[in-house]
Amino acid sequence: MFGFIRPVRPELRVKEADRFQQIYCGLCHAIRARYGRFYTLFLSYDMTFYALVIGSDEAQTAPPCRKRCDAHPLTRRDCAQPDAALERAADVSVLLTYHKFRDSLADEKGPKRALAWLLCRLGRRAYERARARLPEADAEMVQALEDLQQLERAKCDSMDRAADASARLTAAAVPHTGDDRERVLRQMFYHIGRWIYLLDAAQDVAEDLEQENYNPVVLRYGLHTPDLTEIRQPLERTLERSLADICMAFDLLDIRRDADLIRNIIFLGMPLVTKQVLDGTYQTNGGWGKHGSL
């Protein structure tokens, strides 16, 4: 995932900002405990959001624990205690990250392709363990990725078809519970995946034009320059349709904890990032210099 999903800090209460950081740190520790240090390098705000949502049906919030980590070896920091949601998020994070490596290996050329090959080799063993824990989710992700790669090879100019394949990959991360909550969560994460894919394509227009990479936004609108001014309105509308469906799914969920934090991310953070990407003002981590800092 790409780090687009994050809260708007000025609109958070102090305890909500602290809670987001605790989940972020707790997920990092969960990944390290289950898979080693390598995949902690690819921890994102998106997976922090996933852990919040997946665990939102729990009534109680355990008090944070204090731990040291590689990033902060001298001081202990508050982090969320291990639970089923964080373990699930750790497994899914490894699966999605590895499949991102595979996608880059198929798409990139030269040094970037060599780097993707190396990352696949380094991440393979942990991926095999995650796949053994979540075989059904991984099978859905593999199929979705294969469908996406076929569309890319065919230079498909349909944004909806390309975004659908990517959206099915993120929807596959939802736990199979066979109830209404699963149905609502799959709808939510389907449209989150769609939104991320199209937003990432919009952000990469300049680079993909220069390198002649596949980009459904470029093909759909016949772009020859990275200027999005003329297509901003229709592109914004299609992104807003997914945001509206994400908001509707949130309203249907029975949220027992972290509701205000999740609401901030969905109703404020995601629309703001949409605007920033289309304006060309988006900055990773909100402009902060280090990963994981709100």
Image (cartoon, rainbow, N blue to C red):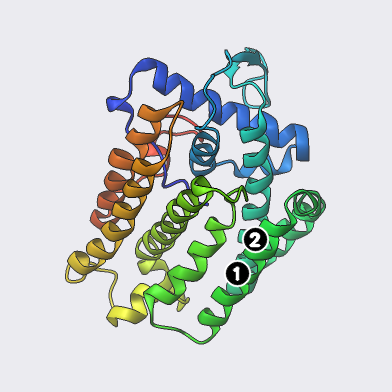
Residue 263: % across, % down = 34, 35
Local SS, label 2 = helix
Q: Quadrant of residue 226?
A: bottom left
- Where is 136 relative to 145, above or below? above
Q: Quadrant of residue 144?
A: bottom right
- Where is 294 relative to 212, above or below? above
- Whether the residues at callouts 2 and 1 have beta carbons within 8 Å, the answer is yes
Could you tell whether 25 is left or right of 20 in the image? Answer: right
Q: Residue furthest front?
A: 179
Q: Which residue is mark 2?
A: 99
> Measuring 37% from the left and 43% from the top, which residue is drawn there?
252
Measure the alpha-carbon separation of dots 2 and 1: 8 Å
- Where is 264 relative to 228, above or below? above
Number of marks in the rendered image:
2
Local SS, label 1 = helix
Could you tell me the amino acid type at mark 2?
A: His
The answer to whether any part of residue 209 appears in the image is no
**Neighbourhood count class around disc 1 (C-alpha, 10 Å): few under 14, some 14–19, many 20 upward:** many
The answer to whether any part of residue 200 appears in the image is yes
Q: Quadrant of residue 33?
A: top right
Q: Which residue is mark 1?
A: 145
Q: Nearer the viewer, residue 236 or 108?
A: 236
> Measuring 65% from the left and 40% from the top, which residue is drawn there?
88
